[in-house]
Image (cartoon, coloured by chain):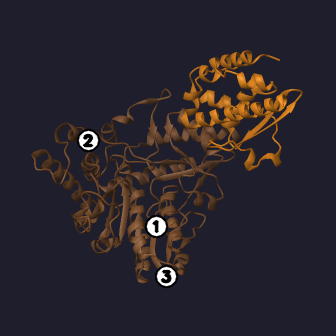
Amino acid sequence: MRLDIGKIRGLFPVLHQEVHGKPLVYFDNAATTQKPQSVLDALTKYYEKDNSNIHRGAHALADRATRYFEESREAIQQFINARESAEVIFTKGTTEGINLVASTFGRKNVGKGDEIIISTLEHHSNIVPWQMLCEEKGATLKIIPINDAGEIIFEEFEKLLSSKTKLVSIVHASNALGTINPVQNVIDAAHAVGAKVLLDGAQSASHLEIDVQKLNCDFFVFSAHKLYGPTGLGCLYGKREVFENMPPYQGGGEMIKEVTFEKTTYNVIPFKFEAGTPNIADVIAFKAAIEFINDLGKDAIRSYEDELLAYANEQLTQIKGFIPVGTANEKVSVLSFNIKSMHPYDVGMMLDANGIAVRTGHHCTQPLMKRLGIEGTVRASFAVYNSKAEIDKLVEGVSRIARIKNK
Amino acid sequence: MSSIDEVQDEIVSEFEILGDDKESTIYYIMEIGGSLEEFPDKQRIEENTIKGCQSKVWLIAEEKDGKVHFRADSNTDITKGLITLLLRVLNYRSPEEIINAKLDFVERIGMGSIIGSQRSNGFASMIKQIKLYALAFQAKQNA
């Protein structure tokens, strides 16, 4: 199906504005995507009509809010093809999902001398929780190296695997470079030595078809706000048997079965991991974002975004002084680059003066930047509402900026 | 030597000529960064960096004939330009002048909207560090 980009753009009110007197070109989608009107409407409707605390209220509003809340969970279950909705836990975001796994699964299953494997491509949120856990437990963090294109070296990964490996936690698609990791092979190899696998899907969930059963990963984490949904909300998928063997994360209401001062028994999943009143409004509105994606179709979205990436690459690489960063064969629509003799901050600020929003800096991947021998990059990342005309503006802006130092 | 206020007026009128076009304003800031006095390589050390700046900024100061001589550098061209502006106003002044300087050019040229909030924070850190140096030199003079 050919997407009608003009029509899609019409669904996003925020896109229709000027910044610094220029029409906004929003290319910071890997940081967060904009929200369609349907998501905004769902948020407003919830507060206008349905606001109520869920799961225990004995009245009509509570009943309605609970139903919508759980319908969202089911929509997400289908979106990632989990076996059952109880395998979907709501969190604050990808970061909390990873921390939850580190604090529960990690604390219980990782001990002295054990090993956790991550890759050089990881976001700080998939590095620091494991460092903290390893420090606490006397375990070791092992790092899969990458090649200069920004792809993990699979043979080196295989060498790191052993019976000591308790968990492999790896990014599905790199936020800084766009590299799509060969996660199916990673999962199969890790399972062969008895290790569990967590996939950081923060960047992949909006671009790639996600089937957690086919992937057979043990955990999959992602954030709603990078999928056209609200901020402050994420999902942690885990296999039932893995979740059931994990201790609770936070203590409080909702997560208990029965409390006495002597002993507390815990609720079943998913509630065992959802202490306190959850982010009800955003969960409910997230369903509208999932529907937006489903209506367009992931295949159509991916092929259009690939087209944008190829179109941008083709033109930008012609510019004198343009240095692409991350040239993996398999990429999501993330384009990282530098301009010779210029600092990424300066490039970003000059693009902003042209109304073009990009991200600059280390993208929370300092070890990756160090490996690549750079301080940071300029990152343009495309979403389904971006157009080729917008990429033309980026190309025009970058070539003008590059000329300052590359005559 | 022009007074602090006279130099600030000069800067304001230069920015008035640039008008509202943000790109040419930034381009101008980058250009003037090129005129920054050379910074000694061996001073590019952690102790001389200014905390609170996203880009790297090194600042050193020495006292000559009762005036403070600042030298600074950065790894980004826009920041170099911002330093140049600041030093045009504050370099080779007495500690008292620096401490008492009301840097109203920052607001008059609309610096906040030109460089954004993160860089504005960094810019404020630079001003603070310059004034701290001035305070230290003043204390030394009074000792």
Give the mark nearer the N terminus: 1 vs 2. 2
Q: Same chain, marks 1 and 3?
A: yes
Identify the hue of chain B.
Answer: orange
Q: Which mark is residue A43?
A: 2
Tag 2–tag 3 contact (CB < 8 Å) = no
Q: Callout 1, which amino acid?
A: Ile
User: Quadrant location of the C terminus of chain A?
Assistant: top right
Chain letter of disc 3? A
Dot 3 falls on a residue whose secondary structure is loop
What tint does the image give chain A? Answer: brown
How busy is the neighbourhood of tag 1: few (under 14 within 10 Å), some, or many (20 plus)? many
Q: Which residue is mark 3?
A: A164
Residue B110 visible (yes or no): yes
Q: Is residue A74 above or below residue B78?
A: below
Q: Looking at the picture, which amino acid does disc 2 mark?
A: Leu
Q: Are the residues flagged by discs 1 and 2 from a single subunit?
A: yes
> Residue at horizontal 52%, vertical 57%?
A177
Residue B110 in the image, given as x and y percentages of width and height: 58, 23
Q: Which mark is residue A170?
A: 1
Q: Residue at x 25, y 48 (%)?
A: A280
Badge 2 density bin: few <14, some 14–19, many ≥20, Cα 10 Å: many
Q: CA distance from mark 2 to mark 3?
A: 46 Å
Chain designation of label 2: A
Report helix, strand or loop for mark 2.
helix
Per the model, the C-alpha gap separating discs 1 and 3 is 17 Å
